[in-house]
Amino acid sequence: MARSGLDVGAFEAVPVWVGRRLRQHVDRAADGLLAELRRGDPQIGEEEAGRARAGIAAGMRHFCDLVEDPGAGWERVAAFYLRVGRHLARDGRDPVETHQALRRSALVAWRTLGAVPGGLDLDRAALSLVVDAQFCYMDAVAEVLAAGYSAEVAERRDRREEPGRRRRGARLLRLLLAEPPADPARIAALAADARWPLPATVAAAAARPRRPGPARAPLALPDGLLADLAAPEPCLIVPGPDGRGPGLLPEALLREWMVALGPAVPVERAAGSLRWARETLALATRGVIPDGGLIRSAEHVPVLVVSRAGELIDDAAAVRLAPLLALPPPRRERLAETLLALLEHNFNAADASRRLRVHPQTVRHRLRALKDLFGDELRDPRRCLEMELILHARMVNGDLGRASAR
């Protein structure tokens, strides 16, 4: 069978005792080959010689690991050479250096097998199995080395390009949120330059830090998300048909920032989505809208609508809530809170009591008082809708009594 590029079966066929016997002679064999290298090149430096010896010894020990434990040994060996590949890239060294060390390790292993006192009693068939295993080992290690080297090179390139990518993304975000809307051709050109696939719809988000303090370290945000969290009014754009995106708002962002997401709209209307997002964030900041994770404006339409009504709501409250406004403040607040809960739960006393965290009988008692105050208006669906909207606007701001003072 194969695992991560290594033919484990080739090692399973080699007798375990071969690895154990070979391991006993690793250091002596590595010293011997290093002495040979120095004779061939008297100018070899101490650092290069030390790396060569370490590579030879590591290669032999890893080969022994795989002979002794073919199933699990490769995971440790692969992790080691993946790190080696990354270090080669960081140090600007050629992977050929490590490939040479591997070939030397194979040579040393064979010399050691022949030099062990009394021999290893390997017949031709057993020797063939060791040869097969050694070739499989060298091929698999070369593959892992190359993967580690390539990954490090790609990550270093991405780190160099990241500041430029962020600048292009910030320019694109500002262009998408411009009013009046920018030229679609210009948007498409900048999106292509920023390597941002232009979606059919987007949702804009407004953000503010949950805690005041010094500038925060940049968050690692997904590639599809456009963000400018350093702006005076931080904002983001989330692509996707429903404005949600596949997990594009990471938990780390929502832990550190209060984020309100506007409705999903065509790209040319992104600025409108941001306006709703900012209104939603303002209400959440004041405690009008609950702040639990991502705040979606589409889930708070009644509050957003009445928040825009302003003076009209005050005038309507003076008429529609007149029976409540004549009561002393403590009783007025209790009955108003109960009326809103009943309106939201279709006058189901049990559901309203759970919302208010009081006994259902208490809600029924208050409902009788409300019927005495409002009479037939509580049977009129249109009047009930008006009162629910007005109560939302007044109760969540804690200013029910404001209309009575007008």
Image: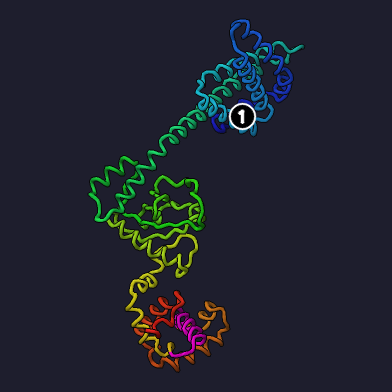
Q: Main secondary structure of the magenta part?
A: helix
In this rendering, the answer to whether 88 lies above or below 185 is: above
**Residue 406 in sight from this viewpoint:** yes
Count residues near mark 1 (Cα–Cα under 10 Å), then give few for <14, some for 14-19, many for 20+: many
What residue is at 33 percent from the left and 74 percent from the top? 309
> For residue 127, what is the image quadrant?
top right
**378 on left or right of 58:** left
Quarter of the picture holding the C terminus: bottom left
Q: Is residue 165 left or right of residue 48?
A: left
Q: Nearer the viewer, residue 73 or 49?
A: 49
Q: Is residue 292 left or right of residue 298?
A: right
The answer to if 337 sits in the magenta stretch is yes
Residue 65, image x, y percentages: 67, 27
Quarter of the image where the N terminus is located: top right
Decide which of 155, 99 is in the foreground and name it. Answer: 155
Asked if residue 171 is positioned above or below residue 22 in the image, the reply reads: below
Q: Which residue is mark 1?
A: 77
Residue 402: x and y in percent read 41, 81
- What amino acid is labelled 1 in the image? Val
